Amino acid sequence: MCGTWIFKRAALLALFVLAGLAGPAQPVALQWTDTYVGRLQVLALLQTLNAELLASRSATLTLEHWCRDHRLAAKPEVVARLMAGDTKAPTAEQLGRLQVESPGEVKYRRVELRCGDVLLSVADNWYVPGRLTAAMNRALETTAEPFGKAVRELEPTRQTIAMTILWAPLPEGWEMGAAGENNTMPDALFEHRAVLFTSERKPFSEVREIYQRGLFRFVPPVAK
């Protein structure tokens, strides 16, 4: 009787985890278990990826390396899917950071960054087309090329202006035994805001990147 009860409880927990982590938009379910060890694994990987992105000159290349290393797609290439919607005008603070005087000098681009069918991040981009080449502007307006690849000839660098953790795998007070009920992985995990500069230290873009749970769509290591 005890064995049957344990089996049923494990089955229900598995269904709960898959329902909470997979979601209808994910064709392949995430396989991380909602256990203390599973949460520690996710926490370690979140911190690793976050640190790599903060230290990188190109978020796109960092995501491609992540996609390749974790086998998220047969072809580890990040592409941008343009998202239709209302244009977000730059704020006065953004104009100051981009060192321009008028919103008319700035264009807005919103994309999903995907590796195969896996959604990695959603990015808002305010950029100054007058500081890009004609070929760069054409690529941004007419192709699925990610921003980082389109402007790589500028040898850009990034300056992070904000970083926000949107979800914590371990609940507040976990070190004192707090229970982590209903803490399944959401779509959005963490957010970066950064300004991009040319090699001459001229700002030409501000980005807001929200990194998604698709980054963890790979088989986790087996706890020993």
Image (cartoon, rainbow, N blue to C red):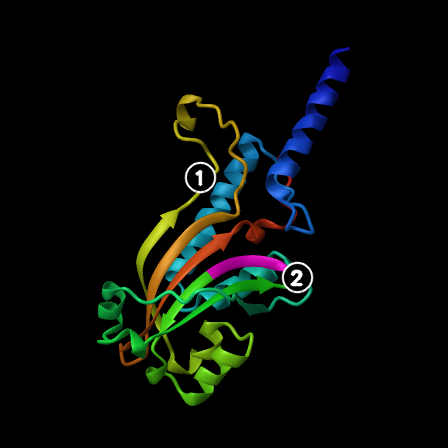
For disc 1, the marked residue is: 168
The answer to whether residue 15 is above or below residue 27 is above
The answer to whether residue 141 is above or below residue 162 is below
For disc 2, the marked residue is: 73
Few, some or many C-alpha atoms within 10 Å of disc 1 (few <14, some 14-19, many ≥20)? some
- Expressed as whole percent of the image width and height from the top left, the position of residue 41 reads 53, 41
Residue located at (69% from left, 22% from top): 9
Based on the picture, tell me whether residue 223 belongs to the magenta stretch: no
Name which residue type carries label 2.
Answer: Ala
Few, some or many C-alpha atoms within 10 Å of disc 2 (few <14, some 14-19, many ≥20)? some
Residue 1 lies in what quarter of the image? top right
Distance of mark 1 from mark 2, alpha carbons? 26 Å
The answer to whether residue 68 is above or below residue 14 is below
- The kind of secondary structure the magenta stretch mainly shows is strand
- Expressed as whole percent of the image width and height from the top left, the position of residue 210 reads 45, 55
The answer to whether residue 80 is above or below residue 198 is above
